[in-house]
Image (cartoon, rainbow, N blue to C red):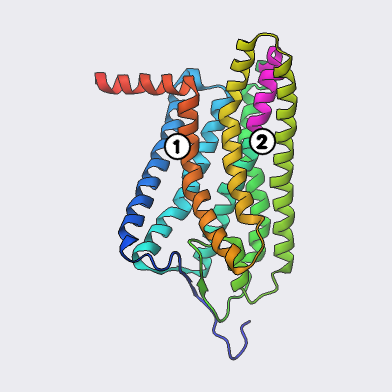
Amino acid sequence: MCEDNQTKVSEIHLLGVQGLGNFKLLFFAALLLFYIAIVTGNLLIILLVSTNNNLKIPMFIFLQHLAFADALLATCVIPMMAEIIITTQGKMSVVGCIIQMYFYFIFGFVQCFLLAVMSYDRYVAICNPLHYILIMNRRICFLLGYGCWVTTWSLSSTEFILIIQFQFCGPSDIDYFFCDFGPVMQLSTSDTSIVQWLDFTYSVLVLFCALTFIIGTYIYIFIIILKISSSTARKKSFSTCSAHLISVGAYYGSLITIYVTPSNEISLNINKYSSLLYTVVTPLMNPIIYSLRNQEIRQALHKKLKKIAVR
């Protein structure tokens, strides 16, 4: 309960970007264009994989899950971010803020599991190609893909059952674009030590263990590729991994910038704009990366556009 001299907060104010001035509409337009591109690009990947039999293989099935997570992550954050830019200050109920944070965690963390699963798929394809169809069969793909979502949902739910019980008394301003974990914990007047410890444990287990697994699989993949005598075959083997490696670099690069910097005032400002990179730029990169570097995606898109043109 709040003390006698404190008022229970029912509404949280997101301050977003201050001092945009005449650039407010330009920033809003750029953000809107980014959002349209993110949703269109990722939905296009989902559509192509769903309707093209040539793309119904493990790598593209996992890419479809990743595109779904990217589109939902952007939708969870960017519309509210755009509203804050226009109105200067966004208002959200405490429950709504926690719900946004909950889904932001799910859509963000599930990408971590999916990238690890995709690295395992590349490991099997390159290091054990003769048994690839047997190992990565439809049942295994289903379990791995949806297992990522179930695992992320289970971990996030246990943490947010505790967070929903927190009290918020006194200050109600968050100098951020959306309801992220750190700023919300600073606003709460409850004892957040258990939840912060739980969040740190989950972050280490999910992010660090997944990254270690990805690095381990790629070390083994590179060893196998280097043993291939034909330079053409080596180049072809490496090209099947390049798009995934770029995605991993973009994902972990932005997360490390956000969550590994010290918690002083300057670093909090850096984190705010790094989170903008993570929520706006990173979800847009996967459709671009896989469209440019994957021949099957380009061919499927060309066929789809050709059919539309004929109609």
Please rate how many residues cluster around mark 1, counting C-alpha atoms within 10 Å: few if below 14, some from 14 to 19, many from 20: many
Residue 127 at what x, y percent from top left? 72, 19
- What residue type is disc 2 on? Ala
Is 200 displayed left or right of 305 in the figure? right
Q: Is residue 143 visible?
A: no
Mark 1 vs mark 2: which is more N-terminal? 1
- Considering the whole magenta stretch, tell me its main secondary structure: helix
Query: Residue 202 in magenta?
Result: no
Tell me if residue 93 comes above or below residue 78 in the rendering. below
Query: Is 128 in the magenta?
Result: yes
Q: Residue at x 41, y 69 (%)?
A: 89
Position of 262 compared to 79: left or right? right
Quadrant of the snapshot with the N terminus = bottom right
Q: Left or right of 5: which side holds 120?
A: right
Residue 54, position as x, y percentages in the image = 49, 17
Magenta range is 116-132
Question: Farthest residue in the top direction?
Answer: 230
Q: Circle 1 sits in a helix, a strand or a loop, which is it?
A: helix
Task: Give the labeled residue for mark 1.
Answer: 42
Q: Which residue is mark 2?
A: 116
Give the total of numbered labels. Answer: 2
